[in-house]
Amino acid sequence: MRISKGKGAAFIVMLLLLLDQVIKIWIKTHFQLHESVEITPWFYIYFTENPGMAFGIEVIGKLFLTIFRIIAVGFIGYYLYKIVKQNYRFGFIACVALVLAGAVGNIIDSIFYGVIFDHSYGQVATFMPEGGGYAPWFHGKVVDMFYFPLIQTTWPDWVPIYGGQEFIFFRPIFNLADSAICVGVFALLLFYRHTLTKSLSKEED
């Protein structure tokens, strides 16, 4: 039996949300903050939290950022619904579904994690602690854990400003939701730029 494009998109979103939250909850309830495990010399599970955007970027207030995310997810969800109804190619729909799943995954942390977990400083967090969580609703921190320091070296002394300092590539620590957003956006720009432009132009008409 052939699965409809809408059901395919829903499956992508639900599967990624499930995997993202299972990984985050496991990390949160088994690691102290900044605890790490080396999987290979270039891949670590490193538990950190950030109050900002993907890859730890923080530029605006937490409550405003969370509300902005929710509004953005509403627009992305509506856009996904429209392109499914208009029968766009499934590859294009799947890319948008990846972005939606990633955005929702990090919103869940922001809305709920401050209430359902206590802090991870010097301890492993408890799920639904008796004394309450570490932050109010909408002020939770996003759990990150994937760290790929592919290159670890030192800048040559003759390099201005950075000479003698440590150089790491790739430095950001991220989660599955971040990955879904980046893969979805990259694939849209690489393979479906014309389709994206055409569909957005149609929405404005």
Image (cartoon, rainbow, N blue to C red):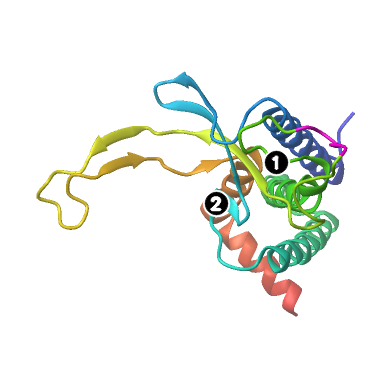
Q: On screen, 158 above or below 22?
A: below
Tell whether position 129 is magenta.
Answer: yes
The amino acid sitting under disc 2 is Gly
The amino acid sitting under disc 1 is His
User: Which element is circle 1 on?
Assistant: loop
Q: Which residues are magenta?
A: 126-130
* Residue in front for this viewpoint, 35 or 196: 35
Q: Could you tell me which residue is drawn at 49 percent across and 27 percent down?
A: 44
Mark in the foreground, 2 or 1: 1
Few, some or many residues within 10 Å of mark 1 (<14, 14–19, 20+): some
Give residue 27's quadrant in the image: top right
* Residue in front for this viewpoint, 16 or 108: 108
Left or right of 32 on screen, residue 164 = left
**Which residue is the site of mark 2?**
56
Q: Which residue reaches farthest front?
A: 131
Q: How many marks?
A: 2
User: Which element is circle 2 on?
Assistant: helix
Disc on the earlier residue, 2 or 1: 2
- In the rendered image, residue 141, in percent from the top left (x then y), is placed at 68, 49
Q: Could you tell me which residue is drawn at 55 percent across and 66 percent down?
A: 59
- In the rendered image, residue 185, in percent from the top left (x then y), is placed at 59, 53
Q: Which residue reaches farthest left?
A: 158
- In the rendered image, residue 181, in percent from the top left (x then y), is placed at 62, 49
Quarter containing the C terminus: bottom right
| Circles 2 and 1 in contact, beta carbons < 8 Å | no
Residue 4 is marked as none
**Which residue is the site of mark 1?**
119
Q: On screen, 195 above or below 109?
A: below
Q: Could you tell me which residue is drawn at 86 percent across and 37 percent down?
A: 128
* Residue in front for this viewpoint, 180 or 50: 50
Tell whether position 167 is magenta.
Answer: no
